[in-house]
Image (cartoon, rainbow, N blue to C red):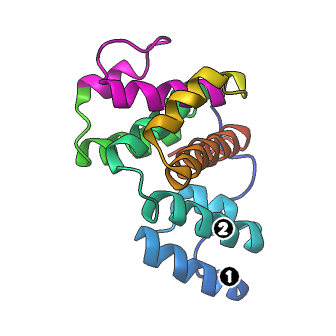
Amino acid sequence: MGTARVPLVQPGTRPELTEIEGRILAERGRVSPLYQVLLNSGPIASGWERLLTAVRNQTAIPADLRELVILRVAVLNRAAFEFDAHAPIAMREGVDAGKIEALRRPALDDSFDERERLVLRLTDAMTRDLEVPDALMDTLQQHYDPRGLVELVATVAAYNMVSRLLVALRVAH
């Protein structure tokens, strides 16, 4: 993959970033390489942190489903950094190793229950094709209220943003 295409900003080296670095530390416990890349732009790092904190910590989407979505997006977008970062989180949230491995396969199989398959079908549609077929959206609307549907779609969209930045700027561990 090569080295990152922009420098990693070391925390504490730019006084104007103190506030955002403090928020990142409070939310994440550390300033990861992803955030060290984002800190090249204070406004982007700040907005990113707020959006991703909302997506990860403030929605009603169950944590296991959220992590399945994140891992599937990472696989489809070839974002190894994202996959490696979230596989342990998925396991902590109750996703077994067999399901994590099944996410790497091109087609969804019977490793997943109906609830998981529905969410992963949305993830695949949004990530691979961009457009969500009406029949799939109709089914989702039978299972999710408007808030849940917005939060689910926003989760898929947000992690597509994450993976695409990671891949474009070659962010690695």
Q: Is residue 138 magenta?
A: no
Let me know if residue 74 appears in the view: no
Residue 36, quarter of the rendered image: bottom right
Where residue 98 appears, x then y in whole percent? Answer: 25, 23
Q: Dot 2: few (<14), some (14–19), or many (≥20) neighbours within 10 Å?
A: some
Where residue 150 appears, x then y in whole percent? Answer: 59, 50
Where residue 90 appears, x then y in whole percent? Answer: 32, 43
Residue marked by disc 1: 17
Residue depth check, mark 2 versus mark 1: number of the one nearer the observer: 1
Q: Are marks 2 and 1 in contact (CB under 8 Å)?
A: yes
Q: Which residues are magenta?
A: 98-126
User: In the rendered image of this protein, does residue 101 appear above or below residue 24?
Assistant: above
Q: Amino acid at mark 1?
A: Leu
Give the side of residue 127 with respect to residue 73, left or right: right
Where disc 1 sits, the SS reads helix
Residue marked by disc 2: 9
Q: Amino acid at mark 2?
A: Val
Where residue 97 appears, x then y in whole percent? Answer: 24, 29
Where disc 2 sits, the SS reads loop
Residue 65, quarter of the rendered image: top left
Q: Dot 1: few (<14), some (14–19), or many (≥20) neighbours within 10 Å?
A: some
Q: CA distance from mark 2 to mark 1?
A: 10 Å
Give the side of residue 11 with respect to residue 37, left or right: left
